[in-house]
Amino acid sequence: MSEQQQQQIQLRIEEHRMKTTYANTIRTTTTPDEVVLDFGMNMPMPGQDGQPAILFDIGSRVVLNWRGAKRLAISLGQVIRQFEQHNGEIPLGNQAPAQQSVPKIAD
C-alpha cells in the first residue's frame, strides 16, 4: 500500500454501559501524566452562621492523558464555534452578553 492510500477502518460504538448525567459545573485537577475532570452539580445551601454556601456534588470523574485532553479541547472548541456561528455568542455568568466581556474560543 502506498503512502497516498489510506486504509479504511470501520468504527463501531458500544453504548450499552453508557450512563447519561447532567452537570452544571466542572472541577479540573492535573498531574504530570493526567488531567482529571470532576463533573457535578453546584447547589446552593445554607452555610455556617447563615452565610450562603455552595455544595459541589460530584457525579462523574473522567481521567484523561494529556493527548486525550488536548483532543477533547480541540473537539469542544470546534463544537462551540459551530454553535455560536449559528446561534450567537454563549454568555458566561448571569449577565446579558452586552453587559460583560465573553471570552471566545480561538480559531
Image: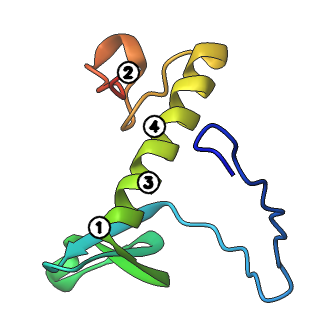
Is tag 2's residue or tag 4's residue first in the polypeptide sequence?
Answer: 4
Give how far apart the Cα atoms at labels 3 and 2 are: 15 Å
Looking at the picture, how far across and down is residue 17, in whole percent?
Answer: 78, 89
80 to the left or right of 7: left
Give how far apart the Cα atoms at labels 3 and 1 are: 9 Å
Q: Residues within 10 Å of mark 1 (few under 14, many from 20)?
A: some
Element under disc 4: helix
Say which residue label 1 marks.
Answer: 66
Give how far apart the Cα atoms at labels 1 and 4 are: 16 Å
Which disc, if any, is residue 107?
Answer: 2
Say which residue label 4 marks.
Answer: 77
Looking at the picture, how far across and down is residue 93, in whole percent?
Answer: 36, 38
Q: How is the model colour-coded?
A: rainbow
Give how far apart the Cα atoms at labels 2 and 4 are: 8 Å
Question: Identity of the amino acid at label 4?
Answer: Gly
Give how far apart the Cα atoms at labels 1 and 2 are: 21 Å
Element under disc 3: helix
Q: Residues within 10 Å of mark 3 (few under 14, many from 20)?
A: few
Mark 2 and mark 1 in contact (Cβ < 8 Å)? no
Q: Residue furthest top?
A: 98
Question: Identity of the amino acid at label 3?
Answer: Arg
Say which residue label 3 marks.
Answer: 71
Is tag 4's residue or tag 3's residue first in the polypeptide sequence?
Answer: 3
Up the image or down, 14 lies above or below 92; here it is below
Looking at the picture, how far across and down is residue 25, in whole percent?
Answer: 42, 62
